[in-house]
Amino acid sequence: MASRPTWKGYLKLALVTCPVALFTATSTAHRISFHTYNRETGHRVRRQYIDAETGEVVEDDEQVRGYEVKDEGYVEIEDEEYASVALESTHTIEIDSFVPRSQVDEIYVDTPYYLAPTDKVGEEAFAVIREAMRSRKMVGLARLVLYRRERVVMLEPREKGMLLTTLHYVGEVRDDAEYFEDIGDTRIGKDMLDLAGHIIDTKMSRFDPSRFKDRYEEALAELVKAKAKGKQPKPAKAPRKPGNVVNLMDALKASLGSNDNSSDEDEPKPRKGSASSGRSKSSGTAKKKPAAKPARRKAG
């Protein structure tokens, strides 16, 4: 069953309008989440807002939204006043312009949502807008108030519906120059480039998201399962640190000789005498961890 809509309103293109609903396209509900407990009593604890000066607990009805003004305290904004800042985009997604999808830099892409019509009468208008974009391979740019904030959004056809993606504003995206400006202009020899290209060719594949498992989540599940049974969790394997590449050409050639189907944890071994293996000289087994304490049962 489809989840409840995040937002309901209208999609508008010029004089063409149809009622639509917005649904979150991704979910993290499957992830393991933890609560915080009192170690001594086993009871769950809850968070409270505390007055920074008096140390007293501030209940919900005593809290007010405010904006700090330098040297003048703060300005109080009541919920009714906050809600009164209504824009047309609060209830309507009006498409302002259309651009080729390739022109939208991926760094501006934020959160995806599904957009669908909410009644049979509006399906025709919805389909006209969708197919017009599909035929011209264009995406629509619009504005939408979502979670009390106006967002720039991108609309594109997706199967029988549309994919609506919120976009970052220019001021939210950091300039990449401050991170890349110190990288030198390296001249790459044709032989090295050909070798690297050949390695890429041997690893060519199709994007299949089902291949990627959340290994950290699986490890957490095993940890919780072991603790719940009062067992000692298996010690995690220490990640292998890659060695420094001394001779790049040798490393590229060694990579070609490795198994094409190896996992991303496998490393090409440098030729003898050309580079160190990168393994730590300090060997020995990991220290045995003390037995895990049984999981605390909720006081009944």
Image (spheres, grey):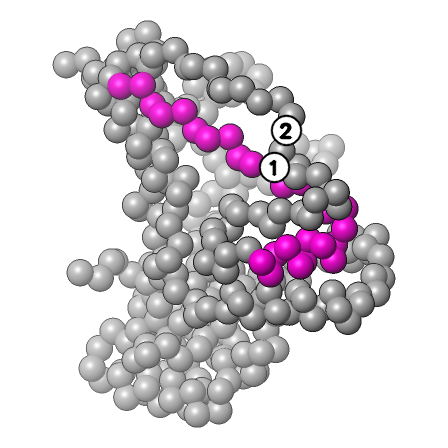
Magenta highlight range? 231-257
Task: Examine the structure image and report whether residue 192 is included in the region drawn in magenta.
Answer: no
**Mark 1, mark 2: which one is toward the viewer?**
2
From the viewer's perspective, tell me whether residue 30 is left or right of residue 167.
left
* Dot placed on the residue nearer the N-terminal end, 1 or 2: 1
Q: Residue at x 31, y 68 (%)?
A: 21
Return the residue nearer the eye: 277 or 229: 277
Q: In which quadrant of the rendered image does the C terminus lie?
A: top left
Can you give x and y, in whole percent of width and height, for residue 121 in the image?
A: 22, 84
Q: Residue at x 84, y 65 (%)?
A: 187
Give the CA separation, mark 1 to mark 2: 8 Å
* Residue ID for mark 2: 280
Question: Is the C-beta separation of discs 1 and 2 under 8 Å?
Answer: yes
Quadrant of the rendered image containing residue 212: bottom left
From the viewer's perspective, tell me whether residue 172 is left or right of residue 153.
right
Does the magenta stretch mainly form a helix, a strand or a loop? loop
Element assignment for label 2: loop
Q: Residue at x 40, y 80 (%)?
A: 157
Sort mark 1 into few (<14), some (14-19) or many (20+) by Cα contacts within 10 Å: few
Amino acid at circle 1 = Lys
Can you give x and y, in whole percent of width and height, for residue 30 in the image?
A: 30, 45
Q: Residue at x 26, y 28 (%)?
A: 225
From the viewer's perspective, tell me whether residue 47 is left or right of residue 191.
left
**Is residue 63 placed above or below 299 in the rendered structure?**
below
The label number, if any, that marks residue 241 in the structure image? 1
Sort mark 2 into few (<14), some (14-19) or many (20+) by Cα contacts within 10 Å: few
Can you give x and y, in whole percent of width and height, for residue 236 in the image?
A: 43, 29
Amino acid at circle 2 = Ser
Element assignment for label 1: loop
Can you give x and y, in whole percent of width and height, for residue 7 in the image?
A: 34, 62
Task: Examine the structure image and report whether residue 253 is included in the region drawn in magenta.
Answer: yes
The label number, if any, that marks residue 175 in the structure image? none
